[in-house]
Every structure is written in C-alpha cells, then in structure tokens.
Image (tube, helix red, strand yellow):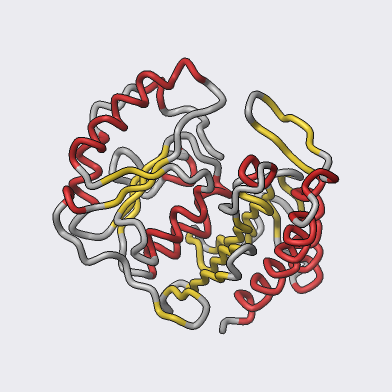
Amino acid sequence: MHPMLNTAVKAARKAGSIINRASLDLDLVRVSSKGRSDFVTEVDRAAEQAIISTLTTAYPNHSILAEESGASGPGGDADYLWIIDPLDGTTNFIHGFPQYAVSIGLRHGGHITQAVVYDPTRNELFTATRGRGAFLNDHRLRVSKRDQLQDCLIGTGFPFRRLDDLDEYVEVFTRVTKNTAGVRRAGAASLDLAYVAASRLDGFWEFGLSPWDIAAGSLLIIEAGGLIADLHGDGDYLETGDVVCGAPKIFPKLHALMQGTPQSVRRRSSS
C-alpha cells in the first residue's frame, strides 16, 4: 500500500471508531443545523479533527479542504491537497440509518491520486491509488459488466435544501426510472460512488455535490474501470459538483438521459 494511502486509511479508521462509539447512543449526540435539512453533529467535528491531526502529523506541509473546518494548511497552491468528508450521510447517522461513510481523497498535480471511503458500520474499506487499481478490503474491484440500461440499478441523490428544484429534478428521475431496472437514493454520495466501483450499482448521478463528496469516490470508479464526468462530459465534476458515472457501456446511455437537465436543478443537492 502506498505510504500516503496507508496514512489516509489510518485516519479513516480513527474517524470510524469515533463514529461507531457515538452510534451506540445516538440520544446523547448533540446536533445543530447548518440550514434546511443540513445537519452537523459533534461527531462530524470530532471525526474531522482526528483525520486532520493524523494527516498533518504525517504531512505537515500538505493542505486540507474539509467539510466542517474549510481550508487550512499552506494554502491553495500547495502541491498536495487532502479533501475530507468526516461523516458523509450525517442525516442517516442521526437517525441510526446505517448508510454513511468517511471519505478522504488526495489531490496532487491536478488529479486525485489517493482515495479512501470507509463504511464503519460494515467495516468496509474502499481504497485506490492512481494507476494501481481499486480495492474493497483486499479484493480488487471492477465496475459492472452490464451493457443494457434496462437491466441496470442506478444510484442518485435528490435535492433537499432547495425544494423548488425538486419538480425539475423529478423529470430527470422519471426518465432514468423508465429506462432502467431501478433507482436507489441511499443518502451518502461517497458510498454510492464506491458502490459503482464495486458493481453494486451500475451507475450514479447527482447534481450540486461538494468536492469532499466526490473526490475519493471518483478515483475508485476510474481505477475500477468506470467512467465519470460532469454533465458536459468533461472532467470538471469537482468544480461543478455535477456527476454522472458508470460502467463503460452504461455511462454514455445514462449520460444521454441527463441532457436537457434544467440549469436550476444543478444547485447544491448533496447529502
């Protein structure tokens, strides 16, 4: 395992331990609101600090971009940028719905080069190093081999902060539903992306995500042989927050269903 990936795994497991301990008595977890249907808990913050402490101890000159604490370190021009979501799926966590994850990605030279998505409830560790493949624990991952869209299970995330976008988003959802075997909305984008890499989902789309939702999962998909792009088919998804991804034979068909998506839909919709 690459030394930087090994450090990220160590950080993710520390965060996972904090999350698992807190999950044993959710009534004691203090919750505050960042906005409509957008929550943060003391667990998010404690997990994030554990991750940042582990990474900066090993790599004090690296920069950090984290969901709760924002940017820190030498600055945006640093060669290495760690992109962190300490608890993706906070709303699920608060309700005891076991679909949430720790997401850590490293950006270097304009590319995500290391990725960890850790599901602490299942002890599933998804990892990737650029050019070296993607893994679930010690098992090599490959995206789905399905080639017919009507046979595919597709993941998504609905807008929840801006409900005025919902009607337009449902138009896209309807198109995908009519052309696939089913659509799932589980509430943690990083895990959805990992599931595409693991062929549990054949594809995924969501609009208005944040970089920490996407960074690690995008490398998992690429290293598992999948395709990922924004709505224009470009690689700017970390900047736009709009993601369409899937197995090579499915991706263009799913991407085609996104065309004509109203601009107003593509605002923040992350979980």
Q: How many marks?
A: 0
x%, y% of residue 76? 65, 50
Residue 104 lies in what quarter of the image? bottom right
Who's the residue at 38% across and 45% down the image? Answer: 184
Say which quadrant the C terminus sits in: top right
Q: Tell which of 102 and 96 is nearer to you.
A: 96
Who's the residue at 25% across and 37% down the image? Answer: 176
Judged left or right of residue 187, residue 33 is right
Who's the residue at 34% across and 56% down the image? Answer: 201
Say which quadrant the N terminus sits in: bottom right
Above or below, 141 against 185 in this view is below
Q: Tell which of 231 and 120 is nearer to you.
A: 120
x%, y% of residue 267? 48, 27
Q: Tell which of 218 and 107 is nearer to you.
A: 218
Judged left or right of residue 140, residue 56 is right
Residue 141 lies in what quarter of the image? bottom left
